[in-house]
Image (cartoon, rainbow, N blue to C red):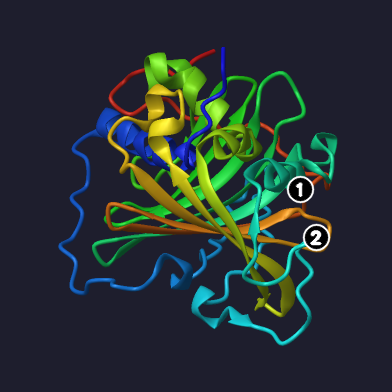
């Protein structure tokens, strides 16, 4: 099965999963009407706010710093984007090779922070992932309007959800991921691997430009602008997307992807990643409770 390689599908899928679980326990909480509207550029959204860990066997280790992306400023240091000078276009195939140059074996683990702004309301996600085994493992904490903090641990095809008030403090419900996501379960796990979209970037990129070095959270990163033609990508997952998408991508001096920003239909997203290839500890919680409403958890 070909991996889903469009945008950050994990974000949408995680939100959908949380809403599905909320529906199992009762009425889905209503999202409050926004009091402000965000008209900021996708590259100037607030970074993801790291939420506090829940006391479980799986520590959520969201190491990426989450300073305001608006503070990302250009430096006066010489451009270091490979052979390119600031403002120079790069062949999309060369850019993808640059992304892969650290070695895929060094990109199976990472920590991430995400902030999505939709009509003035924010959804944040922080967590870690290990893609080295047969089944992806994740430990993420989300904060959604009207729902508060939600923690999901995904190990060996099972999802463990802590979502007060549906779950008691410190308790999780357990269900097979396929029971929650149905036919989308495989798509959900495939979308976890953020590196898997790069082939589509190569196929659909109209233009890649090295913008220049910028300071991000006190570190000099190389910024690139990628204009993507979604109609050139052979994937069902591009349905409903605009014909063109613009990504801003920041790489460190080893070409590890460290920050990505984009906007789709007014939803502005900032993602920060770090700790590529470093060990992460993701284990299934042991404090399991029965599904609200009398539905037993999976054995």
Determine if residue 59 is in view: no
- Quadrant for the N terminus, please: top right
Locate residue 215 relative to residue 253 in the image: left or right. Answer: left
Secondary-structure class at tag 2: loop
Residue at coordinates 71% horizontally, 31% vertically from top-left? Answer: 131
| Contact (Cβ within 8 Å) of mark 2 with mark 1 | yes
Dot 1: within a 10 Å radius of its alpha carbon, few (fewer than 14), some, or many (20 or more) residues?
some
Say few, some or many: other residues with alpha carbon within 10 Å of mark 2 (under 14 / 14 to 19 / 20 or more).
some
User: Which residue in the protein does label 2 denote?
Assistant: 82
Callout 1 secondary element = helix
Compare marks 2 and 1 and give the one earlier in the sequence: 2
Looking at this view, is 211 or 8 the one in front? Answer: 211
> What residue would you read off at disc 1?
98
Classify residue 164 as left or right of residue 152. Answer: left
Quarter residue 208 falls in: bottom right
Q: Looking at the rendering, in which quadrant would you find the C terminus?
A: top right
Q: Residue, x 62% and y 53% (percent of image)? A: 112
Location of residue 132 by image quarter: top right
Residue shown at 80% from the left, 61% from the top: 83
Q: Looking at the image, is 288 positioned above or below residue 98?
A: above
Image: 181 above or below 45: above
Q: Residue 249 versus residue 21: which sits nearer the camera?
A: 249
Q: Nearer the viewer, residue 269 or 129?
A: 269
What's the CA distance linking mark 2 and mark 1? 8 Å
Residue 30 versus residue 56: which sits nearer the camera?
30
- Residue 58 percent location from the top left of the image: 67, 42
Residue drawn 21% across the image and 54% down it: 31
In percent of width and height, residue 10 lies at 49, 38
Residue 171's label in the rendered image is none
């Amino acid at each position: 099965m070909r991996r889903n390689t469009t945008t950050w599908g994990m974000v949408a899928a995680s939100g959908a999963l949380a809403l599905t679980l909320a529906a199992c326990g009762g009425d889905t909480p209503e999202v409050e009407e926004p009091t402000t509207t965000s008209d900021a550029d996708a590259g100037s959204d607030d970074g993801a706010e790291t939420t506090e860990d829940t006391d479980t066997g799986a520590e959520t280790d969201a190491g990426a710093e989450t300073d305001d992306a608006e503070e990302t400023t250009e430096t006066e240091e010489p451009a270091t984007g490979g052979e390119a000078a600031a403002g120079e276009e790069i062949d999309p195939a060369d850019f993808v090779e640059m992304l892969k140059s650290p070695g895929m074996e060094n990109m199976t683990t990472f920590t991430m922070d995400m902030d999505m702004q939709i009509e003035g309301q924010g959804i944040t996600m922080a967590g870690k992932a290990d893609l080295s085994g047969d089944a992806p493992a994740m430990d993420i904490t989300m904060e959604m309007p009207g729902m508060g903090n939600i923690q999901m641990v995904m190990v060996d095809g099972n999802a463990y959800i802590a979502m007060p008030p549906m779950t008691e403090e410190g308790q999780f419900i357990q269900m097979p991921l396929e029971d929650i996501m149905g036919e989308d379960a495989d798509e959900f796990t495939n979308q976890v691997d953020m590196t898997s979209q790069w082939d589509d970037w190569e196929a659909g990129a109209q233009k890649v430009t090295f913008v220049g070095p910028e300071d991000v959270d006190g570190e000099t990163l190389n910024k690139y602008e990628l204009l993507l033609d979604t109609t050139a990508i052979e994937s069902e997952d591009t349905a409903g997307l605009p014909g063109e998408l613009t990504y801003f991508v920041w790489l460190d001096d080893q070409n590890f992807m460290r920050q990505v920003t984009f906007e789709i239909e007014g939803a502005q997203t900032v993602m920060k990643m770090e700790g590529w290839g470093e060990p992460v500890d993701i284990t299934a919680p042991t404090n399991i409770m029965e599904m609200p409403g009398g539905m037993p958890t999976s054995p």
